[in-house]
Image (spheres, rainbow, N blue to C red):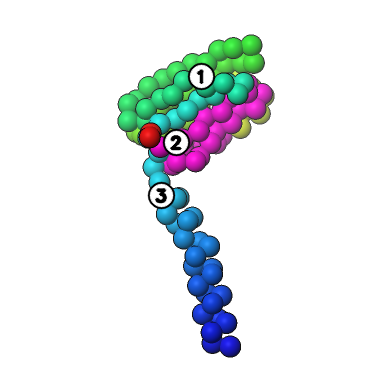
Amino acid sequence: MRKDILLILSLITLSLAPILFLSDSKGNIAEITVDGKIYKTLNLDKNAELTIKNEYGENKIVVENKKIFVETANCKDGVCVKTGAISKSGEIIACLPHRLLIEIKENE
């Protein structure tokens, strides 16, 4: 019985370990894709503003304090604006109506 409990606790600990290590992983670049194609890669170490206008709509993207966010968008739902700022590797902002995706990655 005691060995079973130790085994279960060990398995739980091992399954949570990747989450603990990856959740604090700060990315340092943001890859922006529009309609499935890489549009631009931004360095999060430098503050910047970028407006993307295309046939799908318009998004104003801001890099500030090593974070990136969509400041304004002319889509109806505004989910991309409501997502807020992201900075950790693997985090994503998506604007589906404008076919825009922003993903934080580690610079290799």
The N terminus sits in image quarter: bottom right
Q: CA distance from mark 2 to mark 1?
A: 15 Å
Tell me which residue sits at (41%, 25%) in the image: 42
- Mark 2 packing: few (<14 Cα in 10 Å), some, or many (20+)? many
Q: Residue at x 52, y 74 (%)?
A: 9
Which contiguous range is marked in magenta? 81-106
From the image, tell me which residue sits under label 1.
Answer: 39
Q: Identify the amino acid type marked 2.
A: Lys
Q: Quadrant of residue 88?
A: top left
For residue 24, the mark is 3
Whether residue 82 appears in magenta in the rendering, the answer is yes
Location of residue 108 in the rendering, given as x and y in whole percent from the top left corner: 38, 35
Using the rendered image of the protein, determine whether residue 13 is visible from the camera's viewpoint: yes
- Mark 3 near mark 2, Cβ–Cβ under 8 Å? no
Q: Amino acid at mark 3?
A: Asp
In space, the residues marked 1 and 3 are separated at their CA atoms by 27 Å
Numbered disc 2: secondary structure: strand
Q: Earlier in the sequence, mark 2 or mark 1?
A: 1
Q: Three-letter amino acid code at disc 1?
A: Tyr
